C-alpha cells in the first residue's frame, strides 16, 4: 500500500506531490478524482496554504491513503518548504518600506551602496566590511529577505516588493543618491534582441535584468557591480551577455567582466560566478588578483576571462592554500540528526578563518541539523564522494552529486538552496551522519557567526544558499575603492 511505502521517499519532504508521484497519478487526474480545482491543488503542492479536513479526505481517497497521512505529510512539507520559490510567492512584499535603525551622520564620507535583488545582503555586507562603503538601501521581493538585510545593514532603507513595480524616482526619493549599484538579477525571459534604448519604465515587457539597467540609468552611480551565474556566458550562444554589456555601454558605462571563483579569494567554497564591473569615469577596471591557490575545472571552459590560480601564473609565495571545509567548520561542536548546539562548548578557534568568522559572537546560532528519517540515515551511513558509492538499489534516482559527502580537506562544493537535505548537491558532513547545518552553510558562504538571519528555518537556508559570499564582495569593493581614489 502507498501508505506503507511513503517514508521510503527519503525525508518525506515532498508533500502531496511526493504522494502523487509515488501513486503515479498526474496532477490533472488527481484534481478531477478528488474534486479539487487544479489551481487549488497546485497551491497545495507548492506549499501556499493548508488543507481542510474535507479536502484531505478526498485527496486521501484518490491517492489510496488515509486523510491523516495527507495532513501529516502536508504539515511536514510546510515546515520545510519554500513556498513559490522565485518571483511567484505568497510572501512577497507590496512595496513595503523598512526605515534605517540608525540614520547616517551628516558628515558621512563613505561611498553609498544600493543593493538590489539583495537577498540577505551578502554582496553589500562585503562592501561594508572594507570600511570604505556604507549600504543605504536594499530591494528584494521577499519581506523576510529585507528583514535579514536591514538587521545587518543598520543605515539602510529596505524595500520589499516586485522591483518592476517600483519606479526609479521612488527609489531615489527614499534612498537618495548612490555611488555604487550592486545586485544579481535573475535572467529568466531576457531577450537579447530588443534594444535597451527603447525601454520605458511603464513597459510591461520589462524583465528583471532590464529593470536593473533602468535603475542604473536613472541613478547614474559612479560604479556598478552585476553578479550572475556562469550559465549566462552560453545563453543564446553568448547573445544575452553581449546585449547586457551593450546596454551598459549605451547608458555611459565602461565595463569589464570576469569569471571569479570564491575559493580563489579565501572563501571555503568552490563557487563560480560571472561578475561585471562598470564605471562612469572611463577607467579600465583592474581585477583583484587571487589570494589563494585552488585548481579546478571551470564551468566557463578555457576562456581568458576566467581568473585562474595555476602555479605557472603565480609563484608559490604569492598564493596561500585554499581554505578547506574543516578550516571553516572544524571548531563547531558535533550534532546528530535532529539536534542543535547553542554554544561553542569551550572550543577555541583552530584556524585563522575560524577566528575571523566567529566575529565576536558569544552565542552559537542556527547550528541545527535536519532530522533525517531512518531510511535517510541508512543512506547517509553508506554515503561517499558520489551517489555511485551507495549500495546498488539503495536509491533509485538522483544526480551523481546527490547523497554525497563533502571533502574535509578541500573547499566545499557550491552549496545550493537545499543544502540541509542530503538529496541535494553534495552536502553531507565529511564525518558526521547528517547534512550540513544552516550555521555550517553560512560559514561556507563566509557569513560571520554574528550575522543575524531572520525568517523561518527553511527560508534562512534559502537566504544562505542564494547569497553572494561577503568575502568575495569585500574583494571587489576594495578594488573599486582603490581605483576610484587613484
Image (cartoon, helix red, strand yellow):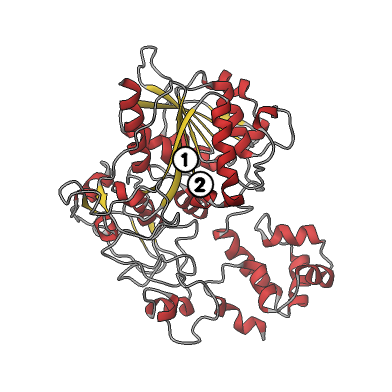
Q: How far, Cα to Cα, is label 1 from label 2?
A: 8 Å
Q: Is residue 179 above or below residue 4?
A: above
- Depicted 377 relative to depicted 133: above or below: below
- Residue drawn at x 32%, y 52% as measured from the top left: 263
Residue position marked by numbered label 1 in the rendering: 148
**Residue placed most toward the observer, 415 or 320:** 320
Q: Is residue 20 above or below residue 272?
A: below
Q: Is residue 187 left or right of residue 357?
A: right
Q: Residue at x 35, y 37 (%)?
A: 287
Labelled pair 1, 2 in contact (Cβ < 8 Å) = yes
Closest to the observer, 297 or 414: 297
Q: Under tag 2, what secondary structure?
A: loop
Disc 1 or 2, which lies upstream in sequence?
Answer: 1
Regarding residue 362, the answer to whether it shows in the image is no
User: x and y percent of residue 17 in the render?
Assistant: 67, 68
The reply, left or right, for residue 208 in relation to residue 347 is right
Indicate the quadrant containing the C terminus: top left, top right, bottom left or bottom right.
top left
**301 to 193, vertically: above or below:** below
Could you tell me residue 327's position as x and y percent? 24, 57
Mark number for residue 455? 2
Q: Position of residue 59 (x, y in %)?
A: 75, 71
Q: Is residue 330 visible?
A: yes
Where residue 304 sits in the image (x, y, percent)?
Answer: 39, 48
Residue located farthest toward the left when viewing the structure as drawn: 317
Residue plotted at (64% across, 37% down) = 162
Amino acid at each position: 500500500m502507498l501508505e506503507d511505502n511513503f517514508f521510503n521517499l527519503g525525508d518525506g519532504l515532498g508533500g502531496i506531490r511526493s504522494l502523487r508521484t509515488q501513486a503515479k497519478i498526474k496532477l490533472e487526474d488527481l484534481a478531477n478524482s478528488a474534486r479539487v480545482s487544479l489551481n487549488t491543488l497546485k497551491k497545495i503542492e507548492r506549499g501556499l496554504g493548508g488543507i481542510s479536513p474535507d479536502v484531505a479526505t478526498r485527496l486521501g481517497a484518490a491517492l489510496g491513503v488515509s486523510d491523516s497521512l495527507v495532513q501529516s505529510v502536508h504539515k511536514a512539507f510546510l515546515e520545510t518548504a519554500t513556498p513559490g520559490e522565485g518571483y511567484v510567492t505568497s510572501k512577497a512584499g507590496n512595496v513595503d518600506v523598512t526605515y534605517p535603525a540608525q540614520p547616517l551622520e551628516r558628515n558621512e564620507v563613505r561611498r553609498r551602496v544600493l543593493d538590489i535583488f539583495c537577498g540577505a545582503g551578502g554582496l553589500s555586507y562585503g562592501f561594508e566590511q572594507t570600511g570604505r562603503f556604507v549600504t543605504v538601501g536594499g530591494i528584494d521581493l521577499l519581506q523576510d529577505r529585507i528583514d535579514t538585510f536591514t538587521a545587518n545593514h543598520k543605515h539602510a532603507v529596505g524595500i520589499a516588493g516586485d522591483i518592476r513595480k517600483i519606479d526609479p524616482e521612488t527609489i531615489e526619493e527614499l534612498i537618495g543618491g548612490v555611488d555604487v549599484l550592486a545586485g544579481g538579477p535573475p535572467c529568466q525571459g531576457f531577450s537579447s534582441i530588443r534594444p535597451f534604448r527603447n525601454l520605458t519604465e511603464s513597459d510591461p515587457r520589462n524583465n528583471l535584468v532590464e529593470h536593473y539597467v533602468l535603475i542604473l540609468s536613472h541613478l547614474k552611480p559612479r560604479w556598478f557591480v552585476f553578479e550572475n551565474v556562469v550559465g549566462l556566458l552560453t545563453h543564446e550562444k553568448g547573445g544575452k551577455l553581449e546585449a547586457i554589456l551593450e546596454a551598459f555601454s549605451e547608458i555611459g558605462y565602461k565595463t569589464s567582466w570576469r569569471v571569479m571563483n570564491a575559493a580563489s579569494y579565501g572563501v571555503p567554497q568552490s563557487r563560480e560566478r560571472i561578475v561585471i564591473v562598470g564605471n562612469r569615469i572611463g577607467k579600465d577596471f583592474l581585477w583583484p588578483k587571487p589570494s589563494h591557490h585552488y585548481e579546478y575545472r571551470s564551468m566557463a571552459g578555457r576562456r581568458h576571462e576566467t581568473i585562474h590560480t595555476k602555479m605557472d601564473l603565480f609563484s608559490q609565495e604569492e598564493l596561500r592554500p585554499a581554505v578547506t571545509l574543516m578550516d571553516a567548520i572544524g571548531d563547531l561542536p558535533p550534532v546528530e540528526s535532529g539536534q542543535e548546539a547553542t554554544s561553542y562548548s569551550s572550543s577555541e578557534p583552530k584556524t585563522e578563518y575560524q577566528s575571523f568568522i566567529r566575529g565576536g559572537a558569544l552565542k552559537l546560532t542556527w547550528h541545527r541539523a535536519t532530522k533525517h528519517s531512518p531510511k535517510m540515515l541508512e543512506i547517509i551511513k553508506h554515503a561517499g564522494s558520489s551517489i555511485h558509492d551507495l549500495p546498488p538499489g539503495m536509491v533509485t534516482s538522483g544526480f551523481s552529486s546527490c547523497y554525497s559527502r563533502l571533502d574535509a580537506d578541500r573547499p566545499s562544493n557550491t552549496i545550493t538552496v537545499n543544502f540541509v537535505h542530503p538529496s541535494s548537491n553534495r552536502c553531507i558532513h565529511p564525518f558526521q551522519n547528517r547534512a550540513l547545518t544552516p550555521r555550517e552553510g553560512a560559514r561556507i558562504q563566509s557569513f560571520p557567526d554574528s550575522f543575524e538571519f531572520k525568517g523561518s528555518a527553511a527560508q534562512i537556508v534559502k537566504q544562505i544558499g542564494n547569497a553572494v559570499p561577503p568575502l568575495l564582495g569585500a574583494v571587489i569593493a576594495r578594488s573599486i575603492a582603490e581605483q576610484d581614489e587613484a
